[in-house]
Image: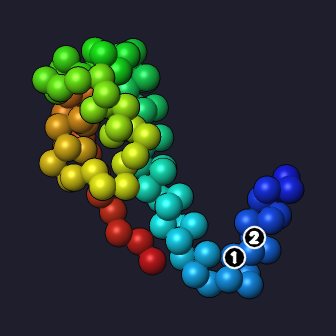
Amino acid sequence: MDDLDKYIEKRKKVDPEFAADFDEGFEEFKIGVMLKEARKKAGLTQDAMAALLKTKKTAISRIENHAEDIRLSTMYRYSKALGMKMKITFEN
């Protein structure tokens, strides 16, 4: 565990609000990373993905880097354009 990880863990233990906000933000960040990795695995650039979705490269960048407000319909179209299925799970 590096210094940043140690700091985050320590801060989460003493600050419940920080912990909640951090965990929520991390989950939103992971969605963007997953979309970006799926696109790259498919061998597509942001320009190519934008063409498939009939949008602009800036929209793809926003989806991948700021996924906190992404709609399920957008995620569905994104996965469909990659020839993938979207699966949503709820866990405790």
**Residue 20, quarter of the rendered image:** bottom right
Q: Position of residue 65 (x, y in %)?
A: 43, 40
Q: Is residue 3 left or right of residue 53?
A: right
Q: Which residue is mark 2?
A: 9
Picture residue at 48% right of the left edge, 50% below the top: 30
**Residue 18, quarter of the rendered image:** bottom right
Q: Is residue 43 above or below residue 29?
A: above
Q: In this view of the protein, can residue 58 be seen by the observer?
A: yes
Picture residue at 74% right of the left edge, 74% below the top: 11
Give the residue type that dot 1 points to: Lys
Q: In this view of the protein, can residue 34 be seen by the observer?
A: no
Q: Is residue 49 left or right of residue 68?
A: left
Q: Position of residue 14 (x, y in %)?
A: 74, 84
Picture residue at 24% right of the left edge, 44% below the top: 75
Q: Which residue is mark 1?
A: 12
Q: Position of residue 52 (x, y in %)?
A: 18, 20
